[in-house]
Image (cartoon, rainbow, N blue to C red):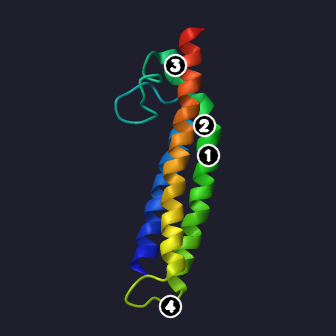
């Protein structure tokens, strides 16, 4: 039960952060900085590259956040399954799937941002 609830809370927190960064970046409300955003060599190359990268990554980041929230709900719901000494296999599977979605989603979003940032730097 603890794995399900703590894991779901972590997924929701990550999804909320992705959503916030996507929204702020798309609106142009996220200035280039050292703390928040998609911070790669390509996106930090210039203000123009930063803005282009975040605009391009906003849509896939929101999609990833939606998927992650869905997995968080499923994970939290799995706390209702009978849990013995070890977590239920469904709980373990959803935990792994949820955090795998975060990692793969972050790679997709970063790749999208880098492509757009490089394009903005060239043109």
- Judged left or right of residue 60, residue 30 is left
Question: Residue drawn at (48%, 30%), measured in percent from left and top?
Answer: 30
- Ranked by sequence position, the earlier of labels 2 and 3 is 3
Residue at label 3?
49
Instruction: Please name the residue that numbered disc 1 is placed on.
Output: 62
How far apart, in angstroms, are the residues tagged by discs 4 and 2? 39 Å
Alpha carbon of mark 2 to alpha carbon of mark 3: how far?
Answer: 14 Å
Residue at figure coordinates x 61%, y 46% from the top left: 62
Query: Where 28 sits versus 15, above or below?
Result: above
Please provide percent x and percent y for residue 57.
59, 34
Q: Nearer the viewer, residue 100 or 23?
A: 100
**Picture disc at residue 82:** 4
Left or right: residue 92 compared with residue 65: left
Residue 56, image x, y percentages: 62, 30
Residue lying farthest to the top in this orientation: 123
Q: Quadrant of the N terminus?
A: bottom left
Where residue 74 sits in the image (x, y, percent)?
A: 59, 72
Quarter of image, res 39: top left
Residue 1 showing in the rendered view:
yes
Q: Tell me which label, 1 or 3, sits earlier in the chain.
A: 3
Q: Are marks 1 and 2 in contact (CB under 8 Å)?
A: yes
Say which residue label 2 marks: 58
Q: CA distance from mark 4 to mark 3?
A: 50 Å
Q: Is residue 26 visible?
A: no
């Amino acid at each position: 039960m603890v794995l399900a609830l703590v894991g779901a809370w972590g997924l929701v927190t990550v999804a909320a952060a992705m959503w916030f960064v996507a929204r702020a970046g798309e609106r142009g409300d996220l200035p280039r900085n050292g703390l928040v955003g998609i911070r790669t060599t390509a996106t930090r190359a210039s203000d123009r590259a930063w803005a282009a990268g975040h605009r391009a990554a906003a849509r896939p980041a929101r999609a990833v956040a939606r998927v992650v929230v869905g997995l968080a709900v499923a994970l939290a719901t799995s706390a209702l399954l009978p849990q013995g000494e070890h977590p239920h296999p469904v709980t373990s599977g959803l935990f792994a799937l949820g955090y795998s979605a975060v990692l793969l989603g972050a790679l997709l979003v970063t790749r999208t941002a880098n492509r757009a940032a490089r394009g903005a730097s060239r043109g």
